[in-house]
Amino acid sequence: MLHPLAYQYNIIIILSSQGCALSRTTYYQTPLYDLTVDKDMNQELHGTGHFEWMSIQTDEDEHSIEMHLPYVAKMMQR
């Protein structure tokens, strides 16, 4: 039997084995609703020196995240 999650997610961080780049976008569109990118969190992560900024073109060309974001949106749904 499947049970609903007993907890809520506020922030989800998606990492890649190819390195860590941060999006400059303000949101990602999904079929369910737009996912807001936490710009303050991105600034904080960039400040550690372990992350770089992703170009808008790279972000738009990236297709694998398109497969994951609807599931992320579903998990974030309240």
Image: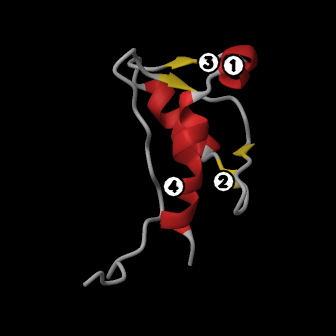
Which amino acid, mark 1?
A: Asp
Of mark 2 and mark 4, the one earlier in the sequence is 2
How far apart marks 1 and 4 lie (CA) works out to 19 Å
Callout 2: helix, strand or loop? strand
Comparing marks 1 and 2, which lies closer to the viewer?
1
Task: Residue at 38%, 19% (x, y): give it.
Answer: 50
From the image, tell me which residue sits under label 3.
54
Question: If you read the primary sequence from the N terminus, does the residue marked by circle 1 or circle 3 appear first?
Answer: 3
Label 2 or label 4, whichever lies nearer to me, is: 4
Label 4 and label 3: CA atoms lie apart by 20 Å
Viewport quadrant of the C terminus: bottom right
**Few, some or many C-alpha atoms within 10 Å of disc 3 (few <14, some 14-19, many ≥20)?**
some
Viewer-side label of 1, 3: 1
Which residue was labeled with disc 4? 72
How far across and how far down the image is residue 61, in percent? 69, 19
Q: Nearer the viewer, mark 4 or mark 3?
A: 4
Q: Which residue is mark 1?
A: 61
Which badge, 4 or 3, is on the more N-terminal residue? 3
The residue beneath circle 2 is: 35
Q: Which of 76 and 4 lies nearest the eye of the viewer?
A: 4
Q: How busy is the neighbourhood of tag 2: few (under 14 within 10 Å), some, or many (20 plus)? A: some
